[in-house]
Amino acid sequence: MIFLDTGALLLAIWASYAIRLSIWTPAITSERVLLSAFACIAAIPVFIRMGLYRSVIRYLPEAAVWTILKAMLIATMIWVIIIFLMEMAGQGIVPRSIPFLYFVLGTLLIGGMRFAAKWVLMAGTGMRRDEEPVFIYGAGPTAAQLALALKGHGNRYVMGLIDDDSTNHGRDIGGYRVFPSTELPQLIDRYGIKEIILSMSAIPISQRQAVLARVTELGVKVRSLPDISDLVDGRYIVSQIREIEIDELLGRSFVPADNGLLDQALAGKVVMVTGAGGSIGSELCRLIIRRKPEKLILFEASEYALYQIEQEVLARGETLIVPVLGSVTDRRTVERAIRSHGVQVLYHAAAHKHVPLVEANVLEGIRNNVFGTLTVATVAAEQQVESFVLISSDKAVRPTNVMGATKRWAELIVRQMAIEAHSKSTGQVFCAVRFGNVIGSNGSVVPLFKKQIASGGPVTLTDPDMTRYFMAIPEAAELIVQAGALSAGGDVFLLDMGEPVRIGDLAKNMIRLAGFQIRSSENPDSGIAIEVIGKRPGEKLFEELFYDRGNAKPTRHPKITRADSAAITGYDMSASLQKLERAILEEEEEEARNILFALIRTDELVENTDIDGRP
């Protein structure tokens, strides 16, 4: 490049004299040869200093024009000074227009060579055989930058941009034609489009859900590019293309966490999480470690899960991490962990949550979910733990399965502990947080659907009309901690999960997001089939978050509601626990099930009583 630039500068000097003197062959004198040599000697170090030889020509940005202009201007000024000194020494006169012509011609040659080389390197003959045609949805700066970054990178070939703004239709942005979104079905067929990349920053928030719903109906793979504000550096824009997450289709608005509540609950505290290796438990640990607690105790029954979460949180900060391997039903292990570390805040996430499995293993489900909660809550009360938060489930509302019933018993146990703490004025807070399914959690339907789609189907549904509440795991963890900070004791907090999602629609959306069509009578030979297998034991057609929605009260957080239905005043909880424990010890499964649901039916009659016994 230095050799070519030297030749270009000599050519620029020759052309400058030719234009100035109006002759093709200006005389070659010793003074002119010397001036030409000085021009190159002055320019090349300037070019090196300005970075003209650091740029990879194939990816030379348009902004390099200004760098070339500045470099030539500096080189020309240095040359002018040399000319002035030579004239003072009597080495001949240089016409005043020569430096100006040299600057203009030199800039054109130096810049022209580079951009011509870039054009040759990037042009090619069109789409390669190994490239897939794609559209970018959006016509803003991010979309144009993405199209440029994809050119010659990877196996995607951008056929054009899609935009809803009619003023852009038919125009070229960054060399790519902008098409209207209404023509997408025809464009997909015409160009054989395999993938649409959504430039989300180019799509207003109010329109994103509608755009997502529209493109997922087209039978092509859909990916997303995050907002440009989320990218550290535009050079990495291609690697930031990701799969559309299913929670982006749920139509729920995300409310930023209240940092004051998070710090109030966690900062500088000794925190313990039971079930720390589970989906919710591990996400709680990730959140807790970011709020700089004094110490974090990871309590987990699975050795592998405990090892994984311990290694992850150790890499995230300098907080003291204490792994404890044990079951929540083991009182001595729980007591030793709480007492020896002086636990102040405890999140009880440990539970058996898979409905069919708990239905098939009733005694173990009751032992872990009911008596495990009783053990941890009792020890927490005895050891003066300041705040105890139970992670409950929407299946605890009017339960029809053992898992939901055990979760309701866990809520009642925690509520009973709150009543005792209130009567003794200990200042301890016991509360429960109730919410539905979290996307991607262990045993959730979303990972199951993904696995079935990846293996070619069919996607199995128990009932397409079944509805469930869904929430992203990080958001659920944040709301759990914030709810705990809001509690005054005896509360059951309900997290706003938006509208329930029809499982049939969820399966269809996931199939379309993966780029497949749905196999049907109209399309029997391709796509992913959906197979209805019938409801499993204990499953409800729909879930509820409230016993009585009218009794729920707002809190200072817009996504958290407080159901201050309170205590089971006048009901002998301890007697029911004794009966249930006896049935467990005698392995009377049917008796245990009857006791479990008998208390639930009694409790539903007094659900509208608050912590002080007021109706």
Image (spheres, rainbow, N blue to C red):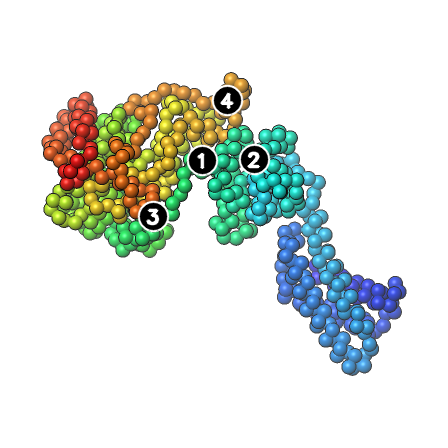
Most extreme residue toward the top is 521
Provide the residue designation for mark 2: 195
- Residue type at mark 4: give it: Arg
Task: Report the Cα–Cα distance between label 2 and label 3.
Answer: 35 Å
Task: Report the Cα–Cα distance between label 4 and label 1.
Answer: 21 Å
User: Is the C terminus in the top left, top right, bottom left or bottom right quadrant?
Assistant: top left
Task: Report the Cα–Cα distance between label 4 and label 2.
Answer: 20 Å
Task: Report the Cα–Cα distance between label 2 and label 1.
Answer: 18 Å
Please report whichever mark, 2 or 3, sits nearer to the chain's N-terminal start: 2
User: Is the N terminus in the top left, top right, bottom left or bottom right quadrant?
Assistant: bottom right
Q: Nearer the viewer, residue 532 or 131?
A: 532
Residue 50 appearing in the image = yes
Left or right of 32 in this view: 611? left
Task: Report the Cα–Cα distance between label 1 and label 3.
Answer: 24 Å
- Residue type at mark 3: give it: Leu
Provide the residue designation for mark 3: 287
Circle 4/circle 2 CB separation < 8 Å: no
Q: Check disc 4 and report its element: helix, strand or loop.
A: loop
Provide the residue designation for mark 4: 519
Q: Check disc 1 and report its element: helix, strand or loop.
A: helix
Q: Check disc 2 and report its element: helix, strand or loop.
A: strand
Q: Bin the neighbour count of mark 1 within 10 Å (Cα to Cα): few under 14, some 14-19, many 20 and up.
A: some
Q: Bin the neighbour count of mark 2 within 10 Å (Cα to Cα): few under 14, some 14-19, many 20 and up.
A: many
Q: Residue at x 67, y 61 (%)?
A: 68
Q: Position of residue 275 (x, y in %)?
A: 28, 40
Q: Residue at x 47, y 30 (%)?
A: 509
Please report whichever mark, 2 or 1, sits nearer to the chain's N-terminal start: 2
Q: Position of residue 436 (x, y in %)?
A: 32, 34
Q: Residue at x 50, y 24 (%)?
A: 518
